[in-house]
Structures are given as structure tokens and as C-alpha cells.
Image (cartoon, grey):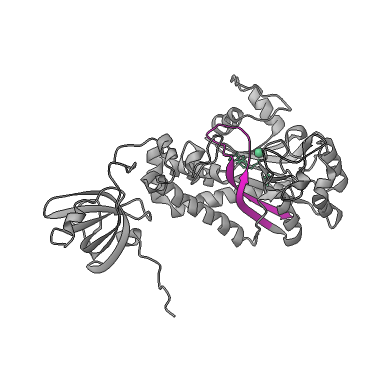
Amino acid sequence: METLAKWKIRIKDLLDSTEYDIPVILRGWVKTRRGSKKFSFVEVNDGSTLHNIQVIADCNLPNYSDIEKLTAGCSIRVEGKLVKSPAKGQNVEVQADKISVYGWADPEKYPLQKKATSREFLRQIAHLRPRTKTFGAVFRVRNILACAVHKFFQDRGFVYVHTPIITSSDCEGGAEMFQVSTLDYDNPPVKDGIVDFSQDFFGKSAKLTVSGQLEGELFATALMDIYTFGPTFRAENSQTPRHLAEFWMVEPEMAFCDFEENIILAEDFLKYILNYVLENCEEDLLFLGKRNEVDVLKQLKKVVDSQFNKITYTEAVELLKNSGKSFEYPADWGKDLQTEHEKYLAEEKFHGPVVVTDFPKEIKAFYMRLNDDEKTMRAMDILLPGIGEIIGGSQREERLDFLQDRIKEMGFNEDDYWWYLDIRRFGTVPHAGFGVGFERVLQFVTGMSNIRDVIPFPRVPNNAEF
Ligand code: 4AD
Ligand code: MG
């Protein structure tokens, strides 16, 4: 059986070539064509790099009249010779022996023309925006960032767990879940005046998960150190540049692990993945930094080299109160930190990452471990300049009776969590973990100001196109 020694040659490989006068085949999409009756210069890109390769087509090619009609967006295959380029700004170019056209792109209709296009407009054509320089770069960086996530955990013996997307339990609390149902909305079965979900597909009310954590805990208390990395869903109506209704979360969970170790891991993790993209995506990041007018390389290096600042929630509230700033929502003990507070702490007060710990129990989820003061929980948020909260985590409540009390206090039904309580009944252990908003990290890495521009197809209120 034949095997492919190497998958397709990409334009990136050709541009990096140190061999010349060798036969090559390339495929890609035309960016521009200019030329004369004698020659055409066709700029081609295949998404493997920011840079185009220049193909030179001689008028003696049998289909030269076709080549003269090439415009942005057409897809072609080129056979030719890779030669050292005499032109400035490029190492090599290709002298074409044969150019065939896979598909035309009507220049009257193709929306990606040379003229500058706004990010808002590109969101409306999200099926085509990966062909632009900016979005090509963003999604190559996204790929490397995902690779870094796996590498970090795999190198440390963590087991990747695929937690369910459909769930019947709420992890974070609050009414922010999407219902999953096959019931007839026009005529749902009703019992005692409410919809009878026992007749629904799953025999009960089912939702899209807001977090893989609860199931992650079940696996951590069997396989020790695990992580999840998958899509999560929140039906909150937040029209902000930092919120998506569907986003990807990385959630490690460690058995026999306490609060301090959890923070150390989170700090190591963030520094590792940021450094990994620095080392593997420098060119794309330089380009994105220029486009977004943010020195992303400097910003990333700064976090990688920093020591994260640590303060308690109580200290944070004091700092905010004494800041002399007038916030839209004044900080007050017992109220959640707002984005404006997070930004003040990370940007103006500490000029770098901040870990805020020990939040009041009223504003955090039910599963967190209660501190001895019985008022605060072993919870932490990590804040980054320009972004605000990027990580949320905690040590989990491993004491059965405390957890049962908390579930009651929150008005949840204990029976819904029987399996979650069972791991406290059978061989319970201290354990902890955190959740990382993957797109928020990517925003920080690329300097893209809107979270909708770092996920292939953003899902937000009033938009689920594509
Ligand atoms: O702080 P959150 O809600 O924590 C959890 O879900 C825990 N179960 C995590 C854990 O301990 N295993 O969410 C974690 C992170 C946030 O810090 C934020 O970066 C991101 O997920 N996030 C969002 N990202 C984009 N759009 C949204 N609507 C987001 N909500 C949270
Ligand atoms: Mg949070």
C-alpha cells in the first residue's frame, strides 16, 4: 500500500525553501493578478501563512486567456518551478508551466475585495472571513493555542476527559441554560399546569451544559488529574465584547489537591500556553499586534515573566473603595466584582495578572469549599489586563454534610445531585480545579478587541448564522 510521505506541500513550506530550481505543485486562492499581454503575476495564498507566493505565468501558456481573467477568490492549481526571486521582499517565486482553475469567483459578487472591510461586516460573512489575512492569522494562532493546552496537560500526566454536552444538572447556578427538547413547542404535554418533561426525549428536562466540571470531578476522583476541553453554553443576554453564548472552556480537575496548589497550577498553565504561542506563532502575532495596535508580544512576555499578584476579595473591595475612582457600580462587600473593577485591579493597580481569592459564598457556585469563617469560599478568579476575568476556579467542597447543606440553601433538589454526592460518600478526597475561557485567552493573545472575532462562528443573542 502506498502512503503519503508528507501531506500536501504548502505555500509556507515553499516560501521557507532553501532549495531552488525544483519542480513544485501548489494549490490555493488567488489574491490578486496583475500583468501585461506577456506575463501575469498571480499572488496565491493557501492559508498556511500570512504571505502569498508569486506565480509568474507566461503568455505562451495554452490557457493564458483564462489566466488573464483570474481575480481574487478564484481557486487554482499550479505546476511549475520554484526559483529564487529577484524581487524585493520575497525569497522565492514560481514560474508556472501549467495553471488550472478549480473554481471562478465573480469579481462583481465576491465580497472580499482589496478595499478595507470592517470587522462588523466580516462577521456577516463569517463563512469567508478565514480567507482574510487577519482571520487566517487568528485561527492559526487558535490552533496552536489548543495544541499548547493539550501539551501542557499531557506532559504532566493529566487525562483528557470528554464530558457530556447535554446534561440534566446545573453547575454554576442561575437560570442561564439552553433547553434541549424534542417536544412540540406549539402543543407541549402539560401536567399540573407545567410542561411535562417526563414525556420529552430524555424523560426529564435536559439542557446544554454550562461547564464540564461536575462530571470532571467524577473522573478526577478516579483517574487523579484530568482536564476537559470543549464547548460550553450560556443563555445569558450579555451583549459585551467578552461574552459568547457558546464558548470553549478548559477545565482541569485535580484530586488530592488543595487551594494553593490549584493557584500554582493555574499560573503555570497560563504562562506555559502564552509562552508556547510566543514561540510558535511569532509572525502571525506580530501582524495581529500591528493590525490591532496592541504590542501583543510585549504583553505576552510581560505575563510570562511576571509573578501573579494575590489578594483576597475583601482586600480587593477595600482597594476599590479607596481607589478614588467613581465606578458605574460602586464596589461593596457581598457584591460580585464588575468588569470595571477587574480592569482597575489588573490595569491600574497591579499592572499585571491578579489572583483574587476567598469570595463571599452568596455570589459563588454551590460546589465550592466553605472557609472556616463560614462566610467566604475557597474560590479564585484570575484577572488579566485588558480582559478582566480569564479563569475561575476553586477548591471543591469534599465534606458530604457541608455540601448537602449548601445544596439545600441554594434551593436545589438533592436528588438531582445524587451521583455528585456519592463521590463524597465513597472515598472522598480534597480536590480542586479551574475553568479557563479559551476565547478570552485568545483575545489576550491576539489583541482582538471583540470575542466574536476569535471563534470561527460566534453564537450570541440574535445570531446563530452559519
Ligand atoms: O467562572 P466560570 O463560570 O467557572 C466555571 O464554569 C467553573 N465550572 C470552572 C471550574 O472551576 N472548573 O467560567 C470559567 C471561565 C471564566 O473565567 C471566563 O474566562 C469564561 O469561562 N467564560 C466565558 N467566556 C466567554 N463567554 C462567556 N459567556 C463566558 N462565561 C465564562
Ligand atoms: Mg467566573
| 37 drawn magenta | no
Side of 139 relative to 193 (left or right): left
Q: Based on the displayed image, in which of its 4 quarters is residue 338 positioned?
A: top right
Which quarter is ligand 1 in?
Answer: top right
Which SS does the magenta portion mostly show?
strand
- Find the residue positioned furthest to the front: 187
- Find the residue positioned furthest to the left: 38
Q: Nearer the viewer, residue 266 or 452?
A: 452
Residue 276 seen in the figure: no
- Give coordinates of residue 315: x percent, y percent: 69, 30
Image quadrant occupied by the N terminus: bottom left
- Give coordinates of residue 443: x percent, y percent: 50, 41
> Height in image: 150 above or below 358?
below
Side of 278 relative to 197 (left or right): left
Q: Nearer the viewer, residue 457 or 103?
A: 103
Point out the stretch of residues depicted in magenta.
226-255
Name the residue: 29% across, 46% down.
106
Name the residue: 17% across, 57% down.
64
Q: Based on the displayed image, in which of its 4 quarters is residue 331 positioned?
A: top right
Q: Based on the displayed image, in which of its 4 quarters is residue 58 positioned?
A: bottom left
| 254 drawn magenta | yes
Residue 239 seen in the figure: yes
> Height in image: 302 above or below 281?
above
Q: Nearer the viewer, residue 399 or 207?
A: 207
- Give coordinates of residue 220: x percent, y percent: 73, 57
Q: How many numbered marks appear?
A: 0
